[in-house]
Image (spheres, rainbow, N blue to C red):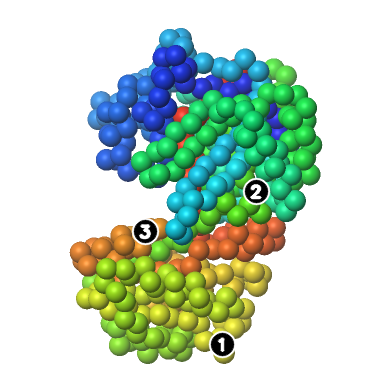
Amino acid sequence: MAIIRPFRGIQYNQEKVPAPNPVVTPPYDVITPEEQEGYYQKDEYNIIRLILGKIYPTDTASDNRYTRAARDFEDWLQKVILAPDLLPSFYAYKQTYPWKGKRETRWGFIGLTRLEDFGKGIILPHENTLASPKLDRLNLLRACKANLCPIFGLYSDPGKKINALLEEYGARENPVIQLINHNEIGHSLWAISEPELINIISNEMAEKQLIIADGHHRYESALEYHRETQLIRTSPGKDDPSGYIMMYFSNLDDQGLAVLPIHRALRSPNGWFDWAGFEERARQYFSIQPIELNEKNPDEILSLLEGLDKGRAGFGMYIGKGKYYLLQLKDTIDPEKVIKEPLPAVWKTLDVTIFQTILLEMTLQMSIKTLKEQEYIGFTHNMQEAIALVDQGVYHWAFFLNPTRLQDIKNVCLAGHKMPQKSTFFYPKLLTGLVLYRFSQG
């Protein structure tokens, strides 16, 4: 199944960059333009200059965000701002974070995995990709010839053997990197280079299927880049360094793996929503209950959602002016019969599927084309932000969803299907800049 191996990771040289906080960032695709500018100002060697360089009106084919990233990458290596490890390693990665009134811990590790076409069933996607982001990441690969941040992969290990090994190693060795960032998430990294431990991890992972949690665009870009390199190599082979990708491996069965809900904010193409008409149509499928919430703590609605019968999808709803509702699918409605797409039951019974098909398409009569274009729908994992967007008039209504269950993600992927759009927000996100993989380093 999955072929994984250690590598000589490239890291910031602590003699020249003693503190990691000024040079690391979240994943590139969650960084706003304002945050991008902030990271640029934070440090001249911040990883933002490599993963998400600025675009200027004067950019040309020979001077652009990708060529500048490659130039800076090479310059930092020459100045030994970045330096490769001496020995191939797996990198144990521990994150601690505030969660429901306590601190939770997630263990995983970073290594290389051989690229595999999705059709082989070894590495599985869980969402669709778009052409533009793939081209962006492909251009960066072509320029830098390196993985600048790991993709996020999931595997299943109910016995938690690898987790136990990582925790034991972390308890007896000092981390090579340790920091707490602005949102109180702790990050610790260890380089595991002992051959015995490397063999144990590699052998344990050998029979695993992998599910991509975050990084689909980067994975597909890496596949395309590898195909390009194979075409120009005189002796193409599977051990070409570009045939591997840097991945963070997280155990699906680890309670420290959290999934946040992704809430929706809607704007009507007609300029307004007809509440009476919506309520009449919605009651064909849902019970609708007005709820009183403490204005200072509207998050109470999430507790109500969490307490709903897991067999029936439910959603919170905010229509402005302090008016909240709780919608729950009626027990007389069978999603498998109502939803006409030729897809398995595990897909049709997902909360996000029911929301998109029964509520948006069938009740609000929003077309699939309208939803895909995302002109009238916004997404956020922050409930307060969704409420504010309605109160500010940016959107008309907001809907609050339960988080997708990990077992549902696993079941959909193993059935050979992908999750509906914007189904998952894995938390916490990985830091970028802890370790890099340069193909020439191997």
Residue that badge 3 annotates: 382
Q: x, y (%) of residue 281?
A: 40, 87
Q: Place residue 26 in its image quadrant.
A: top left
Q: Distance between the residues labelled 3 and 1?
A: 29 Å
Q: x, y (%) of residue 161?
A: 74, 44
Q: Residue, x 57% and y 27% (percent of image)? A: 174
User: Which is more foreground, mark 3 or mark 1?
Assistant: 3
Q: Residue, x 64% and y 69% (percent of image)? A: 346
Q: How far apart are marks 2 and 1 (CA)?
A: 34 Å
Callout 2 crowding tier (Cα within 10 Å): few <14, some 14–19, many ≥20 = many
* Of callouts 2 and 1, the N-terminal one: 2
The amino acid type of the residue labelled 3 equals Asn
User: Which is more foreground, mark 2 or mark 1?
Assistant: 2
Q: x, y (%) of residue 192?
A: 66, 27
38 with respect to 374 (left or right)? left
Residue that badge 1 annotates: 331
* Of callouts 3 and 1, the N-terminal one: 1
The extreme top residue here reads 78
Q: Residue, x 71% and y 48% (percent of image)? A: 160
Picture disc at residue 228: none
Q: x, y (%) of residue 98?
A: 45, 51
Callout 3 crowding tier (Cα within 10 Å): few <14, some 14–19, many ≥20 = some
Please name whichever residue, 114 or 41, is drawn nearer the observer in this view of the structure: 41
Q: Contact, CB < 8 Å: mark 2 with mark 1? A: no
Quadrant into which the C terminus falls: top right
The amino acid type of the residue labelled 1 equals Asp
Considering the numbered disc 1 on the image, is that residue within a helix, a strand or a loop?
Answer: loop
Picture disc at residue 251: 2
Considering the numbered disc 3 on the image, is that residue within a helix, a strand or a loop?
Answer: loop
Q: Distance between the residues labelled 2 and 3?
A: 25 Å
Q: Residue, x 51% and y 78% (percent of image)? A: 308
